[in-house]
Image (spheres, rainbow, N blue to C red):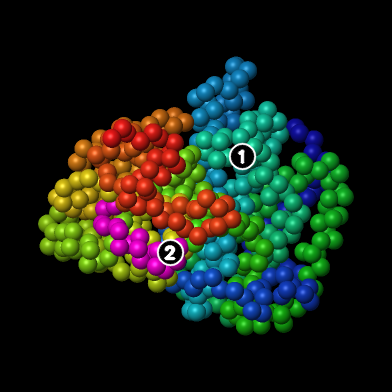
Amino acid sequence: MINLPRAFFSLLITVFLLCFTGCSTTKHKEAHENWIDLFTPSTNPVTLETYTRDQLQLDYTRLNALTLELDQLAVEAATLRRTLLFQESPYISDVENKEIELMLFRFQNALDSLLNMADYYRLNTSPDLDVHTRGGILGMNAALKHTLYSSRFVSLFHDKKELIGIINTAHPSYDIPAGFYDSVAYNVTTLDALEQFDISWALFCKDLANPESPLSKVKATDPVYGKLMDQMDELHATAHIQMEYLLYAQYSHYPELKDRIAHSRISRISKDVSKSYGSSKTATRGFIFKNVARMKSPTAHILTFSGKQADEIKAMLQPGDILLTYTAGYMSDVFLPGSFKHGITYIGTVEERRKAGLTDDFLKQHAISEKQADALIEHVNATTTPDGYQINIVEAVAEGVVLHSLDKLLETHINRLVAIRPNITPAEQLNQLLLLMQYVGAPYDFKFDFQNDAYQCCTEVVYRITDQKGTINYSLVEMKGRWILAADDILRYYLTQNPAAFDFVFLADQSSDPKNFNAVIHSGPKGLDALYELMDVTPPVQ
């Protein structure tokens, strides 16, 4: 039997009993008189966006997909740990190294997606209190899962220095820097993280105990969101135990650490939370989000497109055009090497889609069922996103294959953008667009398995809707044990193997001045030359 120190054993029992009693029986210290300065927005908060029920539904689906992915990754990580611990070979094979890289890539991708969701609902709001409260529940659930899966990952490897050394190795092909394990471990073992985690949960439970709060009303009337809240007791309890265990394992003088925690902010919450609550909307937003999730900046000097440039870009495009983009410092679901990392298909306006042949009659004729026909017609007739942007693109992101807006991407995501047009017949173009609409709603392919048509990543959609049309005949490229087609692979195929496969439309990039982030649009022969130079490819001899 392992002989644990008595203090640690006592602490674990205490934590276990307190955590698993759940919100309904947890007693909370009352708020410090300055709690509102710590856990609510400022008196003049800057609202980045407002969201609607449609946005909530998308993110609810996305949250479920991310949870399934992280559950699968937990199994794979445990299996990999066991394999490496008991292997006879003193070194890591290339196959094992590829498995580790892909696992870390998928793990970071999923964690960052959870963090982005938590941050989104922490920073933004809805004018509808009921919608706003549900957004808070989604954000809190995402934040708890981020902490749970992070601490589980760290706990799995924490006592195996050799394996930590392997995980900490840089993996440039996936943009994973050195020290990945240490970074995740730091985020879940700081005292600030533990304090924020516990205080947020205490305030959440306090509000839920009030039968008149918006949170309690949602729980009583909405079984879907009630189930999300029921999950959160176990999420908090399990994550809390893992964090406490890691703190014990990390610090040799645990009594001193315990004493520091005892004298931290969580123990100084004073006697009247309810008096400080103010309006129910402010309280709901405040107790859930302030400091729940560690912030990550969603932008890193993106390009600035003027309104005139955005109009110019859309005027050059037509339905079926392929857009390949690069975004610096943003979504980890574009963590692939190269000058371009994300693939999108332009679909234009409703009128342009219909002009291309996507009429209701055509869709009904080519749908495999009446239900699919209704869905296709709805996709083709979609006009605006939940936040009011014009729908004109289809892309695969963490929540799946979705209708989205190029206008919004130009405002928020783009560091580099190239547009190419498949050189195909009108009939092939119509087939391309029909297939694209059939993929809308498909789940995201976190494993980048181009052999499985049921799930789609961004360039996988581009591959499936353009391959074998015209003269296009891609060859998949092996990357870390997976046969895929990255954005750069599509461009290299076009520029070096089959220039007749596509027509160049434009390239949008930064100017030569590294401090100038105004977009520059290159078109025509000079634009194509700029693309050859960017891709480090020699233009063909004329």
Q: Amino acid at mark 2?
A: Lys
**Would you say 220 lies left or right of 193 here?**
left
- Picture coordinates of residue 99, whole percent (x, y): 51, 31
Specify the label residue 177 is tagged with.
1
Q: Which mark is residue 534?
A: none
Q: Residue at x 61, y 39 (%)?
A: 177
> Could you say which is closer to the camera, residue 299 or residue 283?
299
Residue that appears at 61% across and 20% down = 91
Label 1 or label 2, whichever lies nearer to me, is: 2
Q: Quadrant of the C terminus?
A: top left
Q: Eyeballing the image, is 147 above or below 41?
A: above
Is residue 207 or residue 154 the one in the foreground? 154
Q: Residue at (41%, 56%) from the top-left corner?
A: 521
Region rendered in magenta: 305-323
The residue shown at (59%, 48%) is 149
Specify whether 430 is left or right of 235.
left
| Secondary-structure class at tag 1 | loop
Residue that carries the numbered disc 2 in the rendered image: 408
Relative placement, left or right, of 454 versus 280 is: left
